[in-house]
Amino acid sequence: MTVWLEAALNGPWSRERQPRIPVTADEIVADALAAAAEGASVIHFHAYDERTGRQRDAYEIYAPIIERIRAAADVVCCPTIPFAGSGDAAAPLSPAERFAAVERLLDAGLIEWSVVDPGSVGIALAADVAAGREGFVYVNPESHVRYGLALAAAHRMTPSYAIYEPGFLRLGAALHRAVPGAPQPVYRFMFSEQFLFGLPPREWALETYLRLLRDEAPGAPWMVAGLGVEIAPLIGAAVRAGGHVRVGLEDAPLGADTGNRALVARAARLVGEAGGVLADAAQVRAACGR
């Protein structure tokens, strides 16, 4: 079994919640190349404003980082999109505004994948709920998903679907069918322990998602991932079931004391122990029809 290994380097957390994430351009490039050296063929990261230490999804931040990564390693780079409305994007954003950096990166030929998350969900830490602190709603209106899928169709881009709840899978599959020419999305099952969404990282939960995927998008590629989760115990089961793997400080439990390189190296070892062989970027591209 050939397995894609994705490294999710930082996420939206800032160092307040995840102190070891790479934030500066030099840090992101260094972590990306270290992850590639350990076997990651897909690199996902969030762009940060180095002055504020906050996420800022701008082409002029993404582009030079991706150029530096690709000059040194053959990997598939995958950016994210800003929240529709949050502390870092207080006013609601239109679909074109949310995908503005992605569209420019596609025009420049710098990316092959992008986040296109097919649904909305409440994101709350169990510890915050117990302390009376509210979480937030991660909002992805259907019009935004359709816009991302239309970009995917125009540029032969692979949509990376984060599946936070079973409904994301059902809606995502229906929207994919409704956008002619959109490449097959990668369904990324998002498990969690620290957050109160979706399903916990258990084999029964993985099987639940796989049964639903067989009904809604048979044959689609999928991977195990999450937020605030220790995904390592599921890696063997995922590989044996024909899936792929994402690890990194975006997904790891908040406050993790392990860096991206070690997380990728451990995942690579577990993939091998389960009988998997890590794919290189060329194999990922071929499987995605590029």
Image (tube, grey):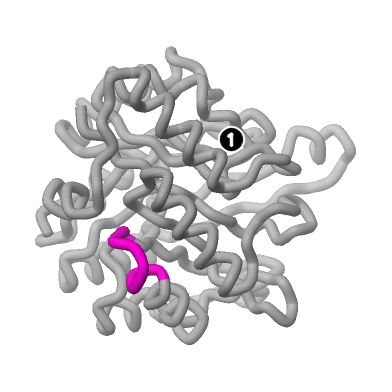
Q: Residue at the spot x=22%, y=64% of the render?
A: 157
The image quarter containing residue 146 is bottom left
x, y percent for residue 39: 37, 44
Q: Furthest-bottom residue in view?
A: 60
The x, y position of residue 90, in whole percent, is 67, 74
Q: Residues within 10 Å of mark 1 (few under 14, many from 20)?
A: some
Residue type at mark 1 is Phe
What residue range appears in magenta?
Answer: 69-76
**Is 112 or 209 nearer to us in this picture?**
112
**Which residue is drawn at the image coordinates 36% and 68% (left, top)?**
72
Queried whether the magenta region covers residue 241, the answer comes back as: no
71 inside magenta stretch: yes
Indicate the secondary structure of the residue bearing disc 1. Answer: loop
Q: Position of residue 133 (x, y in %)?
A: 84, 46
Task: Report the quarter where the C terminus lies.
Answer: bottom left
Instruction: Choose top left, top right, bottom left or bottom right for residue 227.
Output: top right
Residue found 85% across the figure and 32% down from its top: 130
Q: Is residue 117 visible?
A: yes
Frontmost residue, 90 versus 103: 103
Quarter of the image that includes the N terminus: top left
Q: Nearer the viewer, residue 118 or 67?
A: 67
- x 42%, y 28%: residue: 269
Q: Is residue 63 above or below residue 73?
A: below
On the image, the x and y values in percent for residue 174 come to: 24, 46
Picture mark count: 1
Q: Is residue 167 above or below residue 14?
A: above
Dot 1 corresponds to which residue? Answer: 197
> In the rendered image of this protein, does residue 180 appear above or below residue 7?
below
Q: Is residue 288 left or right of residue 169?
A: left
- Residue reaching furthest top? 204
Q: Is residue 99 visible?
A: no
